[in-house]
Amino acid sequence: DWLFEHVGLIWVSNNIISAANNDESDDTTTTTSVDIDALLECALEAGATDVDFDSLEGDDGSNHTDDEDTTNSAHNQIIVKCEPSSVLNIVRSLKSEGYITSQFENQWLIKDEDNRATLDEEGMAKFDKFMDTMEEDLDVINVFHNALVSEQE
């Protein structure tokens, strides 16, 4: 509990898709950008603890350890953070105001970026072997770590 914090995360689209015509035979839609101030107000009034607009600038600070492709889900998304018990209430509130939520879940996030462990080449090899072993174990659902993993190709 000293290294990670349990938070609710809600990904909100940067764009709102609204119907241009309410006629059911016409599927014309328009895309408009989200009013950041209105979204911030709505989220905070619903109980959010933080709203992260950094992903709009291309800075993806997510700490996913599974095999999901998270780069597309975080691109052009606004991330709303809250208490885990408040996720559904905030999602309902956002949707009632017309915002598009693409994903929401509870996650364990590292509390302080300074607590990350930097691994050398040997340490990274051992860490990769450990992670492979954990993925093969059917009893393991999620693995949370503070290792600073570099993307080397």
Image (cartoon, rainbow, N blue to C red):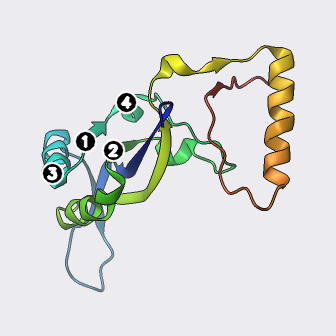
What's the residue at 51%, 30% (across, down)? 3
Q: CA distance from mark 4 to mark 2?
A: 13 Å
Asked if disc 1 and disc 2 are in contact, CB closer than 8 Å, the reply is yes
Tag 4: residue type? Asp
- Of labels 4 and 2, the one closer to you: 2
Asked if disc 1 and disc 3 are in contact, CB closer than 8 Å, the reply is no
Tag 3: residue type? Cys
Q: Which residue is mark 2?
A: 81
Q: Which residue is mark 3?
A: 42
Classify mark 4: helix, strand or loop: helix
What's the residue at 32%, 45% (across, down)? 80
Tag 2: residue type? Lys
- Of labels 4 and 1, the one closer to you: 1
Asked if disc 4 and disc 2 are in contact, CB closer than 8 Å, the reply is no
Mark 4 Cα shell of 10 Å, populated few (<14), some (14-19), many (≥20)? some
Mark 3 Cα shell of 10 Å, populated few (<14), some (14-19), many (≥20)? some
